[in-house]
Image (cartoon, rainbow, N blue to C red):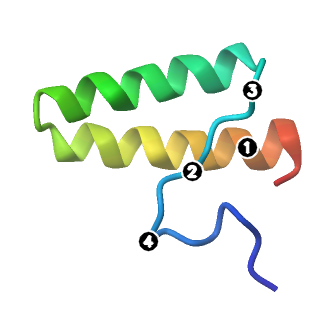
Amino acid sequence: MIGPTDDVSRPPVPVDGCEACRKLAARRHAARAVFDHSAVSDANVRMRAHLRSAHGT
């Protein structure tokens, strides 16, 4: 069974109201702004891990 965070073809979606999600999304946004694709990927991996551990998704 594939969960919502297992589809790596789409970026993970932060949970509204979660400060950790907000920070990770901001990090990803900043990386995109400077075309740092490696940092974007890192932020996505960290957000997926956070979503699994903190939100069970």
- From the top left corner, tell me how far across and down residue 9 is, in percent: 44, 71
**Which residue is located at x 71 percent, y 65 percent?**
4
Quarter of the picture holding the N terminus? bottom right
Amino acid carrying label 4: it is: Ser
Confirm or deny contact between disc 1 and disc 2 (CB under 8 A): yes
Q: CA distance from mark 3 to mark 2?
A: 13 Å
- From the top left corner, tell me how far across and down residue 45 is, in percent: 49, 49
Q: CA distance from mark 1 to mark 2?
A: 8 Å
Confirm or deny contact between disc 3 and disc 2 (CB under 8 A): no
> Which residue is nearer to you in this view: 21 or 38?
21
Q: At numbered mark 2, what does the secondary structure look like: helix, strand or loop?
A: loop
Confirm or deny contact between disc 1 and disc 4 (CB under 8 A): no
Q: At numbered mark 3, what does the secondary structure look like: helix, strand or loop?
A: loop
Confirm or deny contact between disc 3 and disc 1 (CB under 8 A): no
Residue that numbered label 1 is attached to:
51
Confirm or deny contact between disc 2 and disc 4 (CB under 8 A): no
- Specify which label sits upstream in the sequence, 1 or 4: 4
Quarter of the picture holding the C terminus? bottom right
Please tell me how many numbered marks the rendered image carries: 4
Q: At numbered mark 1, what does the secondary structure look like: helix, strand or loop?
A: helix
- Specify which label sits upstream in the sequence, 1 or 2: 2
**Which residue is located at x 39 percent, y 23 percent?**
27
Residue that numbered label 2 is attached to:
12
**Which residue is located at x 31 percent, y 41 percent?**
40
Q: Residue furthest left?
A: 35
Residue that numbered label 4 is attached to:
9
Amino acid carrying label 3: it is: Asp
Q: Residues within 10 Å of mark 2 (few under 14, many from 20)?
A: many
Amino acid carrying label 2: it is: Pro
Residue that numbered label 3 is attached to:
16
- Specify which label sits upstream in the sequence, 3 or 4: 4
Vertical placement of residue 35 versus 26, above or below: below
